[in-house]
Image (tube, coloured by chain):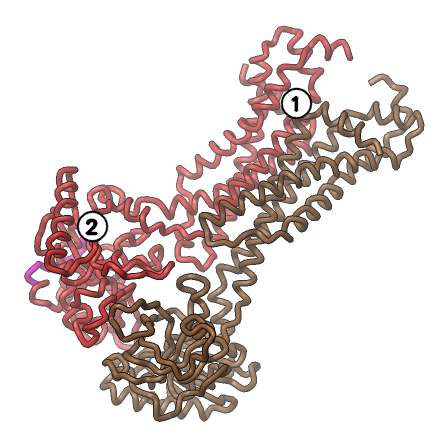
Chain colours: A red, B brown
């Protein structure tokens, strides 16, 4: 029966090629525009660390003075931690693993002569970061807490940087020149670039940044290495000194691993207790319940990294699809009603309303499939143009198989949905009246 | 006119006509808002910076082996002397940050030295003696810095008090409404006396609310090249690229190993274009989507009108046979389209207003100015008339003899 309907539908579509073409074009344009933006949104809000993300949490404290006033669009200083708080949480060891970190850009000088020095981004962190985020070592390993405490000049390089500096990846034991200091290479990790770079300060370009080296945080603070991202101070009296170690400037990110709901609840309570304690000491002024623990995906939602422009473009694309669908409803209505005679004959010969309805729905689905194919081509074109945008998420704009299948599903769904009203109207045609008029 | 007949005829095609009205309404609403968005983007891109952009070039130099602060400062003076000596260069200075650059820095500004006094973050510029002249700023009141007022960066950060400041007029009006700010004192790096007010100086990058964009201040600081960017004023804009090339050569001539590359050198105009590249892309995207939307709507009108013409061939023939002229038939379809478009536009205006309200709530966007609505209406009416012209002419061409044929 289906094959017969498909045959009927193809005949009918071929009979009015212009109208068919218009409908396919409308569906194709609408689907193409929508799928472009849905794909962009999909890659931007995707889980950056599948498998591990469910175990990762980031604690947030509120050390700001009660009367601190933040500019409307300025970054929130309490998004990051101060040095004393980060060290406090680190030493308490209340989580399975924990690490404090901050981003930095250093000048790297290749070991071979004749190569230009270049700037490279990396992370200053404490020892647990590798196990915490599940980085894979190709050679060597990370540093220990003792190295952290001693401020050892050691570095872990990403594969790509090792090759760029030394021409090969197996470089454990060699010396890397970064900034103005020398570091002993103790490990090389496989290139690792979660997108977005969820653990970085949110003022950076998180969809394109990649860490190429990892240094002990203690070195960064001892040697006052340059730190990327937002360093918000709110202190007023002690201008002269404490700087990064001060209790009135936030610049560190902190991530912990918690494996069970009980651990999560316990850590949340610990943060409140810690805030109560700090308040009692006179450091914190705001309510201890301001302390928060975000899951990885919760943190990304809180950060809302999707730019307004992208959201606006998505709504625009969906609005466009809606107009295209209205258009198709009107055209299908005209097309189906014109075939009143044919439908009446079929009804008179014994076809049930349900049969007519199914036949017309199949006809629309065919339009949807053709429109989906066109939409896919248009979406690829759209994504290609997105990849050529200067935005930092541009390179991510690729369709995965799910999105590919989704395109067709959406196209068929949209066209079948658009055919519901016209098909319903068409199968309510009274055969007797139509046949008499003929 | 036979509007009553048209309405009655449309009443027989309620659903199809309703769909067309809806489609036009939605197009009208989206196009109105898209035009408004395009307008706001263009307006944003054309905001003046107060800086004489057409005459400026920037050259960033990054140090590899900095050496002592004294050595870096000495190198900076050598560099500046070389840059000023280049033909066509009238001024050169080290500044930080630079307009449309990558960075922006703020200091909390208050009107009292009480630590608890309310303060607001204000974007700041640091630069050497020729900064104002290089940038081409215009003084509104007060005076420029005198050469003896310039301090070192470390002295400023280290709490040197009494460093004077020049602020933008918008900031002056915000801090001292209705008064002359020159001669007053603000508290940013200790106490800073306002010696001058410039007509216009804006943040190097947008940051914060729109009003803040025009709030900026500058401090007289002799920066080493490692902390800033070389800015040069070129007399003849046509020579800017040539000056960049010569400047790179001059800087490479001596000094320690440094990163000197065309990558870090550009005209300020190019920097502005790059800064607004997203706004431009968004504006073009909106133009594209609006055109596609109108195209699809027009196709819908063509399709449905053609169908109606085909369906009414017999009636048209009868009307022609009993005396209607071709013009009558054509105007009938045109009037019908006008009615449908009008319905769509009326509904579309309400919808446009609704969409604008939603956009205002979720994105920083102003209220849709009234004149976008008639603009959208005219666009849709014209579109409708153009789209219906083909089918209407075809209808007018139906010969009266059709009336005598059965089906």
Relative to residue A111, is residue A400 drawn left or right? Answer: right
Report if residue B77 lies within the magenta region: no
**Mark 2 to mark 1: distance in Å?**
62 Å
Residue shown at the point (67%, 51%) measured from the top left: B375
CA neighbours of label 2 inside 10 A, class few (<14), some (14 to 19), many (20+): many
Name above or below for residue A179 compared with residue B386.
below
- Counting from the top left corner in percent of width and height, residue A179 is at 23, 73
**Residue B114 pos. (x, y %):** 26, 73
- Name the spot of residue A407 as percent of width and height, x first: 47, 37
Task: Choose between B29 and A118: the one closer to the eye.
Answer: B29
Q: Secondary structure at mark 1?
A: helix
Q: Nearer the viewer, residue A148 or A293?
A: A293
Same chain under badges 2 and 1? The reply is yes
Q: Is residue B260 visible?
A: no
| Quarter of the picture holding the N terminus of chain B | top right
A67 w.r.t. B102: above or below: above
- Which residue is at 75% across, 43% downward? B386
Give the side of residue A41 with respect to residue B9, left or right.
Answer: left
Q: Mark on residue A336?
A: 1
- Hey, which residue is sitting farthest front in the picture? B178
């Amino acid at each position: 029966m289906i094959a017969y309907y498909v045959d009927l539908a193809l005949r009918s579509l071929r009979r009015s090629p212009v109208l068919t073409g218009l409908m396919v074009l409308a569906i194709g344009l609408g689907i193409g525009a929508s799928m472009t933006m849905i794909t962009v949104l999909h890659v931007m809000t995707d889980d950056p660390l599948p498998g591990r993300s469910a175990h990762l949490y980031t604690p947030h404290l509120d050390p700001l003075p009660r009367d601190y006033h933040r500019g409307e669009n300025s970054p929130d200083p309490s998004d990051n931690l101060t040095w004393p708080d980060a060290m406090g949480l680190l030493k308490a060891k209340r989580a399975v693993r924990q690490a404090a970190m901050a981003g930095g850009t250093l000048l790297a000088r290749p070991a071979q002569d004749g190569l230009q020095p270049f700037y490279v981004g990396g992370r200053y962190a404490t020892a647990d970061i590798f196990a915490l985020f599940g980085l894979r070592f190709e050679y060597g390993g990370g540093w220990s807490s003792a190295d952290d405490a001693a401020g050892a000049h050691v570095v872990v390089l990403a594969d790509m940087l090792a090759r760029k500096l030394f021409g090969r990846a197996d470089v454990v034991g060699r010396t890397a020149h970064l900034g103005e200091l020398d570091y002993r290479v103790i490990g090389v990790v496989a290139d690792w670039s979660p997108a977005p770079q969820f653990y970085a300060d949110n003022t950076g370009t998180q969809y394109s940044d990649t860490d190429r080296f990892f240094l002990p945080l203690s070195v960064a603070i001892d040697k006052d290495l340059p730190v990327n991202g937002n360093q918000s101070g709110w202190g007023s009296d002690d201008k002269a000194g404490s700087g990064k170690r001060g209790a009135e400037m936030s610049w560190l990110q902190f991530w912990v691993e918690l494996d069970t709901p009980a651990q999560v609840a316990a850590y949340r309570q610990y943060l409140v207790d810690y805030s109560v304690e700090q308040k009692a000491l006179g450091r914190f002024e705001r309510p201890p319940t301001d302390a928060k623990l975000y899951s990885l995906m919760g943190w990304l939602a809180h950060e809302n990294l999707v730019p307004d422009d992208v959201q606006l473009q998505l709504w625009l694309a969906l609005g466009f699809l809606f107009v295209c669908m209205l258009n198709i409803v009107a055209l299908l209505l005209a097309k189906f009603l014109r075939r009143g005679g044919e439908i009446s004959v079929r009804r008179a010969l014994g076809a049930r309303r349900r049969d007519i309805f199914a036949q017309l729905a199949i006809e629309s689905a065919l339009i949807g499939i053709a429109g989906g194919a066109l939409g896919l081509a248009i979406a690829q074109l759209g994504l290609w143009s997105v990849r050529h945008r200067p935005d930092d998420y541009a390179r991510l704009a690729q369709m995965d198989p799910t999105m590919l299948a989704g395109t067709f599903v959406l196209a068929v769904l949209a066209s079948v949905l658009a055919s519901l009203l016209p098909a319903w109207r068409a199968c309510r045609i009274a055969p007797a009246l139509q046949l008499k008029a003929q | 006119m036979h509007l009553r007949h048209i309405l009655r005829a449309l009443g027989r095609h309620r659903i199809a006509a309703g769909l067309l009205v809806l489609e036009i309404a939605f197009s009208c609403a989206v196009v109105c808002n898209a035009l408004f968005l395009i307008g706001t983007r263009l307006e944003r891109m054309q905001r003046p910076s107060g800086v004489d952009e057409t005459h400026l070039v920037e050259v960033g130099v990054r140090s590899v082996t900095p050496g002592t602060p004294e050595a870096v400062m000495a190198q900076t003076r050598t560099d500046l002397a070389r840059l000023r000596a280049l033909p066509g260069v009238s001024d050169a200075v080290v500044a930080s940050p630079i307009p449309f650059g990558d960075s922006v820095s703020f200091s909390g500004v208050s009107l009292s030295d009480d630590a608890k006094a309310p303060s607001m973050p204000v974007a700041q510029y640091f630069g050497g003696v020729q900064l104002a002249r290089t940038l081409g700023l215009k003084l509104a009141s007060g005076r420029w810095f005198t050469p003896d007022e310039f301090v070192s960066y470390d002295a400023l950060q280290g709490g040197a008090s009494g460093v004077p400041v020049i602020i933008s007029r918008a900031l002056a009006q915000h801090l001292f409404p209705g008064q002359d700010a020159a001669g007053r004192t603000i508290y940013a790096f200790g106490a800073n006396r306002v010696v001058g007010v410039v007509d216009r100086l804006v943040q190097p990058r947008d940051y914060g609310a729109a009003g803040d964009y025009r709030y900026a201040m500058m401090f007289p600081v002799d920066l080493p090249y490692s902390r800033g960017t070389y800015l040069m004023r070129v007399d003849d804009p046509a020579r800017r690229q040539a000056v960049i090339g010569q400047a790179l050569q001059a800087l490479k001539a001596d000094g320690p190993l440094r990163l000197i590359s065309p990558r870090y050198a550009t005209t300020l105009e190019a920097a502005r274009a790059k800064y607004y590249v997203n706004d431009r892309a968004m504006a073009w995207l909106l133009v594209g989507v609006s055109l596609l939307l109108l195209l699809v709507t027009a196709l819908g009108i063509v399709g449905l009108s053609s169908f109606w013409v085909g369906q009414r061939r017999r009636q048209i023939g009868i009307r022609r046979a009993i005396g209607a002229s071709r013009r009558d038939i054509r105007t009938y379809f045109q009037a019908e389209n006008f009615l449908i478009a009008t319905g769509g536009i009326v509904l579309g205006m309400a919808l446009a207003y609704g969409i604008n309200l939603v956009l205002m709530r979720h994105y920083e966007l102003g209220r849709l100015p009234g004149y976008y609505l008639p603009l959208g209406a005219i666009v849709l009416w014209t579109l409708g008339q153009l789209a219906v012209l083909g089918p209407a002419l075809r209808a007018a061409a139906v010969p009266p003899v059709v009336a005598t044929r059965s089906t």
